[in-house]
């Protein structure tokens, strides 16, 4: 819509140049210039100025009738276009512990805005990225061959700790853990940590396997074994005494952000936010 008609409409509405200027957030001279320009363009006088306000001329009333229709059509046009505009969301594949981290921080940030999230294992996330089912992945494990069009960014490592219920504290757990509530045998995380155990000389024996970190945590809370979990998932429980931390050498898991190179801006933006969350999550309160 011609900005002059908008200014004309508001002057006619308020019967005042100064009130129209205030409503539009413009200066009064800007309103006066716009009305003068419109009058010259149409070749008619639109307003009669008196001591207290302004009144439409006969020609001004005709112009107002048309301007009102134009104004309403302009509003309707923008409403129709707004309904047709689809604001694209990013499809993200993430491992469960990072999902926990993101959702626990969502109340304090807008990090999940515009994201459609799928929680899965790292192998499935890589597969979905290669078939364009997702735009970005947050995975763990050691990366093997990566196609040329995949961008990889290493994030801060994820700190893990062994925890158990206080009722199991009496057992000697620093030299041997024989009730490990473990990750599934075929998972990237299981392979990663069993390799770390061998390097560190830790004697760890699994007694249960699950893909769910939440289930493993619940089992540890109820005294059914010792779980190896991300520190950010259990630090509140450790602080409150619901779980106790088993002393071991540092145990960490690598986190990688992967995306098609065409989505470089997406991976840089989200991975930076996740990296900051990981750094904060790995520190003690």
Image (cartoon, rainbow, N blue to C red):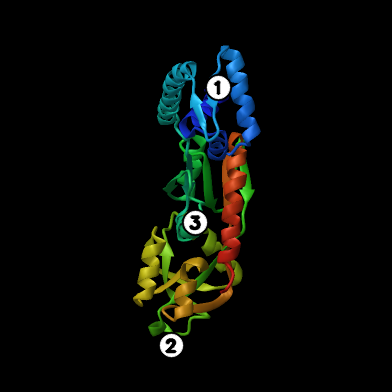
Q: Mark 3 points at which residue?
A: 98
Distance (Cα) linking label 1 and label 2: 81 Å
Nearest the viewer among 277 and 29 is 29
Residues under labels 2 and 3: Cα distance?
32 Å
Q: Which of marks 2 and 3 is nearer the N terminus?
A: 3
User: Residue 112: horizontal and vertical position, in percent?
Assistant: 48, 50
The quarter of the displayed image where residue 158 is located? bottom right
CA–CA distance between discs 3 and 1? 51 Å
Label 3 secondary element: helix
Q: Which of marks 3 and 1 is in front?
A: 1
How packed mark 2 is, by other alpha carbons closer than 10 Å (few <14, some 14-19, many 20 or more), is: few
Residue bearing the label numbered 2: 170
Disc number lying in front (2 or 3):
3
**Among numbered discs 1 and 2, the one appearing first in the sequence:** 1
Q: Residue 57 carries which label?
A: none
Relative to 239, does residue 37 appear above or below in the rendering?
above
Quadrant location, the C terminus: bottom right
Label 1 with label 2: CB-CB less than 8 Å:
no
Residue 101 visible from this viewpoint: no
Dot 3: within a 10 Å radius of its alpha carbon, few (fewer than 14), some, or many (20 or more) residues? many
Residue 93 vertical placement versus 226 (above, below): above
Check the image and name the residue furthest to the top: 43
Under circle 1, the secondary element is: loop
Judge by depth and name the residue closer to the eye, 81 or 229: 81
- Image point (59%, 24%), residue name: 35
The numbered disc on residue 2 is 1
Left or right of residue 226, residue 250 in this image? right
Between disc 3 and disc 1, whose residue precedes?
1
Q: Residue at x 54, y 30 (%)?
A: 50
Residue 212 as seen in the image, left or right of residue 268: left
Q: Is disc 2 placed on a helix, strand or loop?
A: loop
Report x, y in % for residue 179. Answer: 41, 74
């Amino acid at each position: 819509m011609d900005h002059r008609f908008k200014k004309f409409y508001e002057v006619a509405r308020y019967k005042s140049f100064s009130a129209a200027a205030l409503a539009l957030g413009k200066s009064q001279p800007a309103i006066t210039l716009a009305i003068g320009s419109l009058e010259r363009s149409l070749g008619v006088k639109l307003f009669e100025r008196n001591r207290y306000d302004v009144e439409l001329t006969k020609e001004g009333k005709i112009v107002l009738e048309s301007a009102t229709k134009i104004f309403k059509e302009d509003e309707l046009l923008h409403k129709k276009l707004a309904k047709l505009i689809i604001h694209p969301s990013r499809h993200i594949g993430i491992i469960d512990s990072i999902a926990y981290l993101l959702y626990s921080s969502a109340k304090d940030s807008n990090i999940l805005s515009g994201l459609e999230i799928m929680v899965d294992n790292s192998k499935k996330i890589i597969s979905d990225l290669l078939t364009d089912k997702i735009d970005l992945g947050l995975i763990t494990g050691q990366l093997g061959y990566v196609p040329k069009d995949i961008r990889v960014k290493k994030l801060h490592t994820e700190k893990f700790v062994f925890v158990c219920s206080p009722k199991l504290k009496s057992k000697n757990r620093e030299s041997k853990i024989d009730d490990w509530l473990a990750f599934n045998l075929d998972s990237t995380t299981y392979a990663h940590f069993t390799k770390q155990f061998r390097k560190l000389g830790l004697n760890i024996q699994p007694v249960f396997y699950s893909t769910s970190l939440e289930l493993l945590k619940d089992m540890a809370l109820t005294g059914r074994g010792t779980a190896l979990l991300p520190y950010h998932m259990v630090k509140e429980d450790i602080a409150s005494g619901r779980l106790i931390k088993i002393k071991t050498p540092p145990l960490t898991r690598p986190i990688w952000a992967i995306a098609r190179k065409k989505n470089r801006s997406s991976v840089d933006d989200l991975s930076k936010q996740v990296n900051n969350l990981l750094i904060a999550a790995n520190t003690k309160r």
